[in-house]
C-alpha cells in the first residue's frame, strides 16, 4: 500500500502542473468531488452523492447523462469514496453494479481510470461526468462541488483520505 | 541714396567677380585632381546604387519567402494538425479503455490548439481583404467543427459509441470538409501570391540587370572621358609651360643681346682706336659699366627666382622701419626712373610702425614693383609710392601696406591672376615690344608670402595699376630666420 501511495503521488505530480491546487489552506488528505465546468450542480449532500456513485441516478437536472468516474481499485481515493460515500467495500461495490445492471436498477456503469490526471481529463471532456480527486490534484479545468454545503477548506467537510489507515 | 545703392551694387558685383575668379583659378589649377575626385564620387555613387539594387532584390526574395513559401509551409502544418485532431478523435472510437480514450482526447485537443493558433496567426498576417475574409471563415468553420468534435469525444468517453458515430457522420464530417476546403483555398491563395511574387522578382531582376548595365556603361564612358580630359589637361599644361619657357629664353636672350651688343660695339671701337680722347674713353667705359650692371641685375634676378622657387633662400626676419625701406628702394631705382624720365613721389603716413621682414628681400620686392611701374608706366611718367596702415581681410588685424602706383597701360582683369605666374608675359606687352623675363612679379609675390604678407593689385586698362605689398606689423624686436617654405626661430 505504501508503494501504491507513492506511485499515486509520483503520477499526480506532472498532472498537477496543469494548474494550481484548489487552495493552499486545504489539507492534502481532503477528497474533492469534481464535475465538468459546464455542470450547474454546486452542492450535493452525502446522500445524493451515494445515489450518484451507486449508479442509481441517471441524469443531472440539466438533462445531461451522468457518467461516473472511478479510480483503479486499491487506490486510497477510491477507498475513501467506497467507505465514506458508498458505505461499501470493494467486493460489495462490484457486486452492487453487477447485480444492478442485471436487474436494471443501476443506470450507469462506472468508468475506471488509473491516474488522477486521467480522471481530471475525463471529467474535463465529458459534460455529465463526476469523479473524485485528492485536493492537491485539482486544477481549474474541472469544477469542485460542495458536499453537505461545505467547501473543501472548511473543517466540517466530510470527505477525507485516511493515509494512516492505508499504511 | 541712389549713389549709395549703386555703390552697394558695384561692391556686390566686385565681390562676385572676385569669388568667381578664385573658384575658376582653383578649378583650373587642380583640374586633374577635381576630375579624379569626380571619378571617385561617380564610382562610389555607382557602388551605392548597385548595393541598393541588390538590397532591394534580396528584400523582395525575402518577402516572397516570408509571405508565400513560409505561408505554404505553415498551411501544410495546419492541414496536418487538423487531420491529427480528427484522427485522434476517431482513434478514441477504437477502444473501450477509458485511459486510452482520454489519451486520444488529449492528443486531439493538443492538435486542435495548434490549428487554432495557426489560424489566428494567419489572420494577424493577412493583408488583403480576401485573406481576412477567408481567415475569418476558416476560424468559424474550425470552431464549428470543434463543437461537434467535443460532443463526439464526450459521447465516446461516456461509452455511447453509436451516438458518437452518428454525430460524427451527421455533423463532424461536413464540418471537417468545410475546414478542409477552407485550408485548400488558403493554400491556393498562397500559391497565387507566390506566383505573383515570383513574377515581380523576375521583372525586378530584369530591370536591375538593365539598370546595372546602363550604370556600368555610363561609369565606363565617364571614366574614359575623365582620363582623356586629365591627359589633355596635363598635355596642355606641359605645352603652356614649354611655351612660357621658350618665351622666357627668347626674352632673356633679347635682354642679354642688347647690352652685350652695346658692350661689344664699345669694346670694338676702343680696340680699333676710334676712341682716342680721354673724355670719350671715360664715356665708353661708363656705357660698358652701365650695360654690364644691367646684365648682372638680370642674371641676379634669374638666380634669385630659382633659389626662391626651390626654397633654398633663407631670410633674416626682423623689425624694419618703413621709411628706411622706402628710402633704400628710392635710391636703388633712382637711376632707372631718371633714365626713363619718371618722377617718383612718396607719401608716407605719420607714425608708421615697424614691419616684420628681411630688409634686402623687402627692398627687392618693392624695387621689382617700381621697375615694373617704370616699364609699363606709359607716357604719364609719374610713380607714387605710399605707405599706410590697414586692416587685414580675415582677422581684421593691423598690417602695413606699401603701394606702388603708375598711370600707364594698365592690366586687363582677365590677366590679373596670370601675371603672378612665372614666365607669364602679357600678349599686349609682348606686342608693344616691352622687354621682360616674366619673373619680376612672381619673385615679388614669393618674397611677400615668405615674409608672411601678400601682394594685391588693382588695375584698369589705359588708366594705370596699383600694386600693394601687405606686410605684418612687428610685434616685438625679434629676429627670425625664414626659409621660403618654413619659419624657424633663431
Image: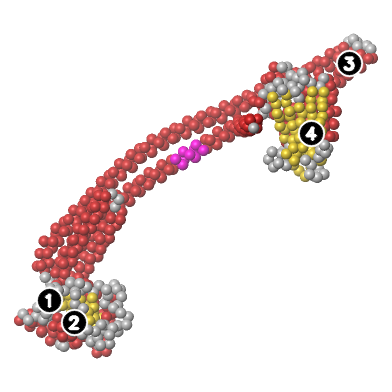
Badge 3 or badge 4: first in the primary sequence: 3
Q: Are marks 2 and 4 on the same chain?
A: no
| Left or right: B231 in relation to B339 | left
- Magenta residues, as a range? B41-49
Q: Which residue is mark 1?
A: A59
Residue B452 in view here: no
The overriding secondary structure of the stretch rendered in magenta is helix
Q: Which residue is mark 4?
A: B387
Q: Nearer the viewer, residue B173 or B456?
A: B456
- From the viewer's perspective, is the residue at label 3 or at label 1 nearer? 1
Q: Is residue B162 above or below residue B366?
A: below
Classed neighbour count for the residue bearing mark 4: other residues with Cα under 10 Å, few (<14), some (14–19), many (≥20): many
Residue under mark 4: which chain is it in? B
At which x and y percent is residue B57?
38, 44
- Residue at horizontal 25%, vertical 46%? B192
Cα distance, mark 1 to mark 4?
127 Å
Total marks in image = 4
Cα distance, mark 2 to mark 4?
124 Å
Q: Are marks 1 and 4 on the same chain?
A: no
Cα distance, mark 3 to mark 1?
156 Å
- Give the quadrant of residue B289: top right
Classed neighbour count for the residue bearing mark 2: other residues with Cα under 10 Å, few (<14), some (14–19), many (≥20): some
Q: Is residue A115 above or below residue A154?
A: above
The residue at the far left in this view is A103
Picture disc at residue B284: 3
Amino acid at each position: 500500500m505504501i508503494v501504491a501511495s507513492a506511485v499515486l503521488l509520483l503520477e499526480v505530480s506532472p498532472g498537477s502542473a496543469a494548474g494550481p491546487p484548489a487552495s493552499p489552506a486545504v489539507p492534502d488528505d481532503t477528497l474533492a468531488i469534481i464535475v465538468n465546468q459546464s455542470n450547474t450542480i454546486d452542492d450535493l449532500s452525502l446522500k445524493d452523492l451515494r445515489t450518484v456513485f451507486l449508479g442509481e441516478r441517471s441524469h443531472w437536472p440539466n438533462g445531461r447523462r451522468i457518467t461516473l468516474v472511478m479510480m483503479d481499485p486499491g487506490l486510497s481515493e477510491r477507498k475513501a469514496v467506497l467507505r465514506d460515500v458508498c458505505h461499501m467495500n470493494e467486493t460489495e461495490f462490484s457486486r452492487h453494479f453487477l447485480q444492478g445492471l442485471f436487474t436494471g436498477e443501476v443506470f450507469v456503469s462506472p468508468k475506471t481510470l488509473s491516474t488522477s490526471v486521467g480522471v481530471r481529463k475525463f471529467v474535463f471532456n465529458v459534460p455529465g461526468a463526476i469523479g473524485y480527486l485528492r485536493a492537491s490534484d485539482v486544477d481549474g479545468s474541472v469544477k469542485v462541488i460542495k458536499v453537505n454545503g461545505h467547501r473543501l477548506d472548511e473543517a466540517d467537510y466530510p470527505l477525507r483520505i485516511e493515509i494512516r489507515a492505508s499504511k | 541714396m541712389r549713389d549709395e545703392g549703386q555703390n552697394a551694387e558695384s561692391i556686390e558685383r566686385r565681390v562676385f567677380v572676385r569669388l568667381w575668379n578664385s573658384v575658376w583659378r582653383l578649378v583650373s589649377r587642380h583640374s586633374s585632381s577635381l576630375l579624379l575626385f569626380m571619378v571617385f564620387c561617380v564610382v562610389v555613387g555607382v557602388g551605392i546604387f548597385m548595393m541598393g539594387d541588390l538590397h532591394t532584390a534580396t528584400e523582395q526574395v525575402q518577402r516572397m519567402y516570408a509571405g508565400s513559401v513560409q505561408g505554404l509551409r505553415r498551411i501544410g502544418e495546419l492541414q496536418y494538425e487538423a487531420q491529427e485532431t480528427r484522427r485522434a478523435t476517431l482513434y478514441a472510437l477504437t477502444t473501450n479503455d477509458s485511459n486510452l480514450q482520454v489519451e486520444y482526447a488529449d492528443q486531439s485537443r493538443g492538435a486542435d490548439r495548434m490549428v487554432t493558433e495557426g489560424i489566428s496567426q494567419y489572420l494577424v498576417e493577412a493583408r488583403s481583404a480576401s485573406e481576412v475574409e477567408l481567415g475569418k471563415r476558416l476560424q468559424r468553420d474550425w470552431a464549428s467543427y470543434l463543437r461537434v468534435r467535443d460532443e463526439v469525444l464526450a459521447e465516446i468517453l461516456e461509452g455511447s459509441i453509436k451516438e458518437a458515430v452518428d454525430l460524427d457522420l451527421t455533423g463532424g464530417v461536413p464540418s471537417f470538409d468545410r475546414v478542409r476546403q477552407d485550408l485548400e483555398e488558403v493554400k491556393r491563395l498562397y500559391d497565387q501570391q507566390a506566383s505573383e511574387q515570383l513574377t515581380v522578382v523576375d521583372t525586378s531582376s530584369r530591370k536591375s540587370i538593365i539598370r546595372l548595365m546602363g550604370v556600368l556603361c555610363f561609369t565606363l564612358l565617364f571614366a574614359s572621358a575623365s582620363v582623356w580630359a586629365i591627359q589633355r589637361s596635363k598635355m596642355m599644361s606641359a605645352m603652356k609651360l614649354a611655351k612660357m619657357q621658350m618665351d622666357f629664353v627668347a626674352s632673356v636672350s633679347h635682354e642679354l643681346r642688347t647690352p652685350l651688343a652695346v658692350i661689344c660695339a664699345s669694346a670694338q671701337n676702343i680696340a680699333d682706336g676710334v676712341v682716342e680722347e680721354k673724355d670719350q674713353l671715360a664715356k665708353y667705359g661708363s656705357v660698358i659699366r652701365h650695360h654690364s650692371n644691367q646684365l648682372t641685375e638680370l642674371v641676379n634676378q634669374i638666380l634669385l627666382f630659382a633659389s626662391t622657387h626651390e626654397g633654398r633662400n633663407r631670410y633674416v626676419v626682423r623689425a624694419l622701419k618703413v621709411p628706411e625701406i622706402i628710402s633704400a628702394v628710392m635710391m636703388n631705382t633712382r637711376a632707372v626712373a631718371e633714365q626713363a624720365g619718371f618722377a617718383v613721389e612718396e607719401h608716407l603716413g605719420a607714425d608708421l610702425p615697424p614691419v616684420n621682414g628681411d630688409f634686402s628681400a623687402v627692398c627687392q620686392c618693392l624695387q621689382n614693383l617700381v621697375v615694373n611701374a617704370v616699364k609699363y608706366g606709359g607716357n604719364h611718367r609719374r610713380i607714387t609710392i605710399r605707405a599706410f596702415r590697414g586692416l587685414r581681410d580675415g582677422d581684421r588685424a593691423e598690417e602695413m601696406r606699401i603701394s606702388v602706383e603708375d598711370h600707364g597701360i594698365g592690366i586687363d582683369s582677365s590677366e590679373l591672376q596670370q601675371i603672378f605666374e612665372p614666365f607669364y608675359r602679357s600678349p599686349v606687352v609682348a606686342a608693344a615690344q616691352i622687354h621682360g623675363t616674366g619673373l619680376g612679379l612672381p619673385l615679388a609675390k614669393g618674397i611677400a608670402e615668405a615674409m608672411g604678407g601678400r601682394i594685391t593689385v588693382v588695375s584698369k586698362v589705359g588708366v594705370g595699376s596699383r600694386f600693394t605689398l601687405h606686410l605684418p606689423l612687428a610685434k616685438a624686436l625679434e629676429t627670425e630666420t625664414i626659409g621660403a617654405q618654413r619659419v624657424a626661430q633663431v
